[in-house]
Amino acid sequence: MVGVKQSPVDMLAEALEKFAGPMAKFVIAKQIKDMGETKDSIPRRKLSILIERAINAAIYNPQLKTRAKKEMHDILENMEESNGQLTVPEEASAAPSEPIVERDIHGIDVLYS
């Protein structure tokens, strides 16, 4: 199976971005720093902790949190180790087709696609 060469952190940041918008990459970077790791050296065993911390920092809507956790944990489960590099199969990295709508604190619906 051919995989897409992308760092695990980048894959998780892309997934979080669908739920939390462009701030996702900054949230991920801050959580990695707070964990005492770097993007390139964070161990696989800490990625699930990173997911939980990033989602809790970036998403306030409980339903959206649940969807984000599921998608990000699915990505983590689909990662394959090949020659010391984590990759994700192409079909597992495809974006979901349905848009995400969240109501902000002012009662305005915000669409993430």
Image (cartoon, rainbow, N blue to C red):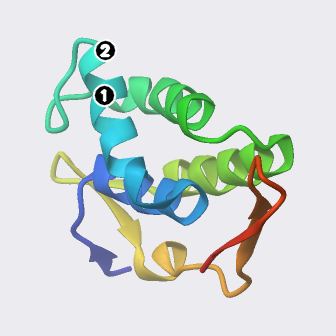
Amino acid type, label 2: Asp
**Residue 112 in the image: above or below residue 108:** below
Where's residue 106, x and y in %?
78, 52
Where's residue 77, x and y in %?
56, 50
The image quarter in which residue 101 lies:
bottom right
Residue 57 shown left or right of residue 107 in the figure = left
Q: Dot 1 corresponds to which residue? A: 30
Which residue is at a point 67% across and 87% down the rendered structure image? 97
Dot 2, crowdedness within 10 Å: few (<14), some or many (≥20)? few
Which residue is at a point 43% across and 32% down the rendered structure image? 47
Q: Dot 2 corresponds to which residue? A: 34
Q: Identify the secondary structure beneath mark 2.
A: helix
Q: Nearer the viewer, residue 42 or 14?
A: 14
The image quarter in which residue 58 lies:
top right
Dot 1, crowdedness within 10 Å: few (<14), some or many (≥20)? some
* Mark 2 vs 1: CB contact within 8 A: yes
Quarter containing the C terminus = bottom right
**Residue 21 in the image: above or below residue 37:** below
Q: Nearer the viewer, residue 30 or 70?
A: 30
Which residue is at a point 14% across and 38% down the rendered structure image? 40
Residue 61 shown left or right of residue 24 in the figure = right
Q: Nearer the viewer, residue 26 or 4?
A: 26
Amino acid type, label 1: Lys
